Amino acid sequence: MSIVTKTGDDGTTAIMYSRRVPKNHTRIEAVGTVDELNAAIGLARALDPNSPKTDRLVRIQKDLVALMGELATDIADLDRYRADGYSRITADNVAWLDSLAEEIESKLGKLRGWAIPGPPPAAAALDLARAVCRRCERVVCCLVEKGMIENRQIMVYLNRLSDVLWLMARTDGRPTP
């Protein structure tokens, strides 16, 4: 099967369970922004392939794939989504990020002043990912306000993730726990 379907030539795109929405729909903006976040994290990994952060970044990327699936599901289809066994963001995902933030903070010590994004390249990519994550939060907030998503853990996860990405960027090449 080809990736080229031509079904989007009319300005619509598919979400879960064959529903179609306009490409400028808030749901698609949210999914696309999370996809961009995932790509920025992938860039950070590619810039420092031997980093001790790699396993944790891969886990975050897998979480983001699950998060995109949930965002791409109309609220009317959530029961089916759950019944089909798709992964969802839960309080456990958030707790893992909380523990990761605590570990990194304990290694970094007290941080003072503003951080300027920049070298090394992997740290700059993590700062880019953090900025994209903040945009994800804003777009997902619109979905929450419109009653288009039910899982509030998505907002909490993105909020924690932006903190973790900021902390990871501050390690400046030092090993992250």
Image (spheres, helix red, strand yellow):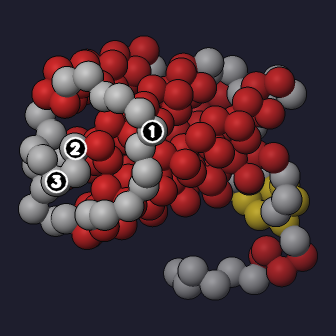
Q: Secondary structure at mark 2?
A: loop
SS of the residue under disc 3: loop
Q: What residue sits 62% from the left and 18% below the top? A: 152
How packed mark 1 is, by other alpha carbons closer than 10 Å (few <14, some 14-19, many 20 or more), is: few
Left or right? Give the position of 135 relative to 24. left
Q: Residue at x 64, y 57 (%)?
A: 32
Depth check, mark 3 against mark 1: the one in front is: 1
Identify the mark at residue 171; answer none if there is no mark: 2
Residue, disc 3: 173
Q: Is residue 87 visible?
A: no
Amino acid on which disc 2 is placed: Thr
Query: For the C terminus, which image quadrant?
Result: top left
Q: Classify 10 Å Cα crowding around label 3: few (below 14), some (14-19), many (20 and above).
A: some
Residue 114 is labelled as 1
Is label 2 in contact with label 3 (beta carbons under 8 Å)?
A: yes
Q: Earlier in the sequence, mark 3 or mark 1?
A: 1
Label 2: few (<14), some (14–19) or many (≥20) C-alpha neighbours in 10 Å = some
In this rendering, which labeled residue sits more in front, label 1 or label 2? 1
Using the image, determine if residue 81 lies above or below residue 101: below
Position in image of residue 10 (x %, y %): 90, 76
